Image (spheres, rainbow, N blue to C red):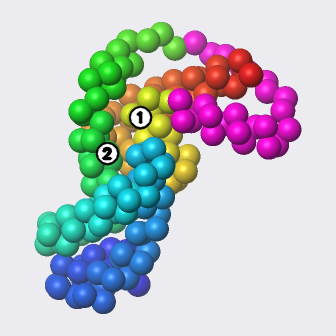
Amino acid sequence: MTDEELMQRVARDSDSAFEELYRRYARRLQGFFFRQLGGDEEAASDFTHDVFLRVYESRDKFIKGSNVATWLFSIAYNLCKNTYRHNEHVMNFLATLDAEPVSEEDVEVRLTLEQQRDAVRNALSSLPPPLHLLFSMHYEEGLTIPQIAQIEQLSEGVVRGRIYKTMKIIRQKLASI
């Protein structure tokens, strides 16, 4: 059964369909929240349950033909975004993000595989939360640029630009090692 068929059954109050949807996405969402919330397992679990509570409460509002994963990650994104909103520094960063000039840089990093993994983990952990969230949605969760644009309610060009800038920051951090 496809995700969309499951959602149609969930909309008709099928508990078994809701359980299957939860089985398919809970672990993925919990991992997403774990990474976005600084490794806090309890918060990741709470946020995951909150996503499914919202899905259940608005099950009749799911639009046939929509992508279920995009809908779930839209909810997850908005939960993270609301959490980040309390951080004034992050909001100031977002306001200036699109004004930064973009330049092409090629960085070659020659490290052992273990050192590369550690360096990448450190670079990711130092990203501002909105960029870490974007990186996670695209590279770890496999969401497409159009899906992310829909989730963030931005144009695809802005999303591409932010992904480019995120990778530029990561390259710079890796190059300084």
The residue lying at 26 percent from left, 47 percent from top is: 78
Residue 52 x %, y %: 27, 68
Does the magenta run of residues contain 166?
Answer: no
- CB-based contact (under 8 Å), mark 2 and mark 1: yes
**Which of 9 and 174 lies nearest the eye of the viewer?**
174
The stretch drawn in magenta includes residue 124: yes
Whole-percent x, y for residue 117 in the image: 72, 42
Q: Which mark is residue 80?
A: 2
Neighbour tally class for label 1: few under 14, some 14-19, many 20 plus, Cα within 10 Å: many
Please give the range of residues in magenta: 103-126
Q: Position of residue 39 (x, y in %)?
A: 48, 49
Give residue 10's quadrant in the image: bottom left
Left or right? Give the position of 176 relative to 75: right
The local secondary structure at tag 2 comes to helix
Circle 1: element type: helix
Report which residue position mark 1 lands on: 129
Q: Is residue 25 above or below residue 149?
A: below
Compare marks 2 and 1 and give the one earlier in the sequence.
2
Left or right: 104 in relation to 17: right
The image quarter in which residue 96 lies: top left
In percent of width and height, residue 26 lies at 40, 69
